[in-house]
Amino acid sequence: MSVSCLAPGPVYTKPEIVKDTKEKLGWLGDFMEVAPARVGEIAVKKTMKGKMIIVPGKPARFVSNIIRALPRRWAAGIYYTLGKEN
């Protein structure tokens, strides 16, 4: 038995998410976005292979690796800023 964590980044499933992502991330959100069906395909395949952390899409994986390399305080600040309501 194994557990996988899916961290897909932006997934445009409804108009509110598209709007919020574009407001907070601008062009980077569009660049990192992965289609919902593709996220599902990748998640199932990698879960079946026993992958622990799944980040679909090369741009999202790249940004994820950069954030993981940052000091925790910086990463927390980034997540806090992106998570704030306008």
Image: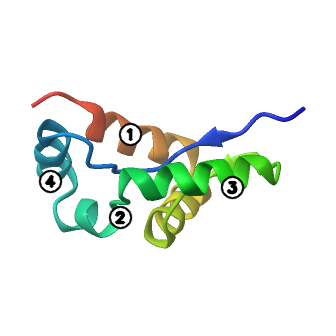
Going from the N terminus, do you reach mark 2 or mark 3 first?
2
In depth, the one of 30 and 43 nearer the eye is 43
Going 63% across and 51% down the picture, which residue do you hit?
Answer: 54
Distance from the alpha carbon under mark 2 to that under mark 4: 11 Å
Q: Residue at x 26, y 65 (%)?
A: 28
- Residues tagged 3 and 4 counted as in contact (Cβ below 8 A): no
Q: Position of residue 80 (x, y in %)?
A: 34, 34
**Between residues 75 and 56, which one lies in front from this camera angle?**
56
Instruction: Indicate which label's residue lies in the foreground, 1 or 4.
Output: 4
Q: To which residue does mark 2 refer?
A: 32
- For image coordinates 58% across by 57% down, the residue present is 42
Q: CA distance from mark 1 to mark 4?
A: 16 Å
Which kind of residue does numbered mark 4 sit on? Answer: Lys
Dot 3 or dot 1, earlier in sequence: 3
Q: Secondary structure at mark 1?
A: helix
- Identify the amino acid type marked 2: Met
Q: Quadrant of the N terminus?
A: top right
- In percent of width and height, residue 21 lies at 20, 48
- Helix, strand or loop at label 2? It is helix
User: Residue 38: x percent and y percent?
Assistant: 46, 59
The answer to whether residue 8 of the structure is visible from this angle is yes
Q: Nearer the viewer, mark 3 or mark 4?
A: 3
Disc 3 residue type (three-letter): Lys
On residue 79, which mark appears? 1
Q: Which mark is residue 45?
A: 3
Where, by quadrant of the figure, is residue 4 drawn? top right
Q: Secondary structure at mark 3?
A: helix
Crowd band around label 3 with a 10 angstrom C-alpha radius: few (<14), some (14–19), many (20+): few
Decide: marks 3, 1 in contact (CB < 8 A)? no
Mark 2 or mark 1: whose residue is earlier in sequence: 2
Marker disc for residue 71: none
